[in-house]
Image (cartoon, helix red, strand yellow):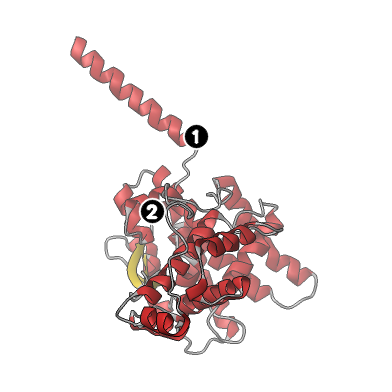
Amino acid sequence: MKEGWARQQSARFLKSSTIDPRIRLIERLEEFTGQYPWQWTPAEGEAFIAHLRSGKNPIQLSTARTYEVTIGLFLEYALDARYGWVDVCLERFGEVPQQVFHEGNSVLHTVEYEGDPRRRPLDYDEVQALFDAADARPGKIRGQGRKGALTALRDAAVIKAIYAFGTRRTESSRVDLADCRRIRKAPQFGKYGSMMVRFGKASKGAPPKRRTVLMVPEMDWAVEVLDQWVTEIRPQLSPGKHPALWVTERVGRLSPRSINEAFVTARKDAGLDEDLDLHCLRHSYITHLTEFGYPARFVQEQVGHSHASTTAVYMGVSNEYRNTLLEASMKNRLGNEWDVTS
C-alpha cells in the first residue's frame, strides 16, 4: 500500500524529498498506533497529534496541519476504488480504511500565514550589524593564524548578495557566473545588473520556477561586493572551469546548508536575536523594497511569488514608514478638502 502510494506520487513528478518524508510519517503513525492503516480510527489520529504536541519540542500548528493533510492523502489513496485496496482489505481482514481526520478534529486553515511569529524582517541597523560581523570575521581568523579567511570573505559576500537580490538559500547555491548579466538600460551596474534564478522554488509536481531579479539602485553597493568576489577572491580558491558563482575551497558548489551556517555564524557574532534565520533576509528584502517605494507588483515579481498575498505576509514595514504614509494620506485629504471649500 505504501509502495503504491509512493508510485502514485512519483507519477505526479513529485520529488523524493517530498515523497520520502510522507512515507516516513505514515510509518511513524503505524508504529505509534501498533495497527495497520485499515484499522486506524479518528481516535488514533487524534492521539498521534496530541503526542507530537507534548514533550520538550512540540510541533507547530502549521506542522500539525501538514501531518494531518499528508495522512489524509494517504488514506484518500487507500480508499480510491481505482486502486482496489478497499476490496482487498475487506476480503482479507473484514475491515476497510477510513479517514481519521475530519473538520471536527483537524487544524483549520483560517489565516494566510502561520509561520513562526518570531521570524521577522531585520531592520536597517540589524542588517548593517550582520554585515559588519561577517566582514570582521576574516580578520579575526587571520589574527588567530587559522585557515579559512578566504571562505569567510566568501561567506560575507554571499550573505550580502542574498539580501541584495532577495534570493532563497537553494536558489543562491545554484546560481552560476553566467546568471549574472548586464542590463542595457542600467549600465552603471556592469555585469551585475540582474541575476537569473533558474532553480526557483517549484510548485509540487512542477519544474523549478525561473525569474530574473533586477538590481535596484538602493542595493548598488552589492555590485562592488560581487565584483570583488568574482575578480579577486574566487580565483584564489582555484575553481578552474567550475560554473558556480559560489564555490568551496574543494572546488565544489557551496551548499544551502553551508550558506545557512555562514548566516548563523554572522548572526551570533553580531549578537542578534537567535530566532532570526537566513530566510529573514528575504523578509527584509521585501520589506525594504516596499519602504523604498517600489510597486507591489514589482516586488512580487522580484521574489518570484505567484500571489501578492504571499508577498504581503513577508512584509513588516517600520513604524516610520507607516507614519510617512499616514502623513501623506492626511496631506492629500486636507488638500482635497481645501480644494472643495475654495
| Residue 310, disc | 2
Which residue lies under the disc numbered 1? 319
Q: At 32% from the left edge and 58% from the top edge, which residue is drawn?
A: 301
Residue 32 in the image, given as x and y percentages of width and height = 62, 71
Q: Can the viewer see residue 230 in this picture?
A: no
- Count residues near mark 1 (Cα–Cα under 10 Å), then give few for <14, some for 14-19, many for 20+: few
- Label pair 1/2, CB-CB below 8 angstroms: no
Relative height, residue 18 to residue 184 (above, below): below
Residue 333 in the image, given as x and y percentages of width and height = 29, 21
Q: Secondary structure at mark 1?
A: helix
Q: At 48% from the left edge and 63% from the top edge, which residue is drawn?
A: 68
**Nearer to us in this view, 126 or 303:** 303
Occupied quadrant, residue 45: bottom right
What residue occupies the far bottom of the structure in this picture?
240
Question: Label 2 sits on what residue type?
Answer: Thr
Residue 40 horizontal side relative to residue 88, left or right: right
Occupied quadrant, residue 180: bottom left
**Nearer to us in this view, 213 or 16:** 16
Residue 120 in the image, given as x and y percentages of width and height = 54, 49
Q: Secondary structure at mark 2?
A: helix
Relative height, residue 294 to residue 232 (above, below): above
| Residue 263, disc | none
Q: Can the viewer see residue 150 in this picture?
A: yes
Question: Label 1 sits on what residue type?
Answer: Asn
Relative height, residue 19 to residue 296 (above, below): below
Q: At 31% from the left edge and 53% from the top edge, which residue is drawn?
A: 298
Relative height, residue 200 to residue 4 (above, below): above
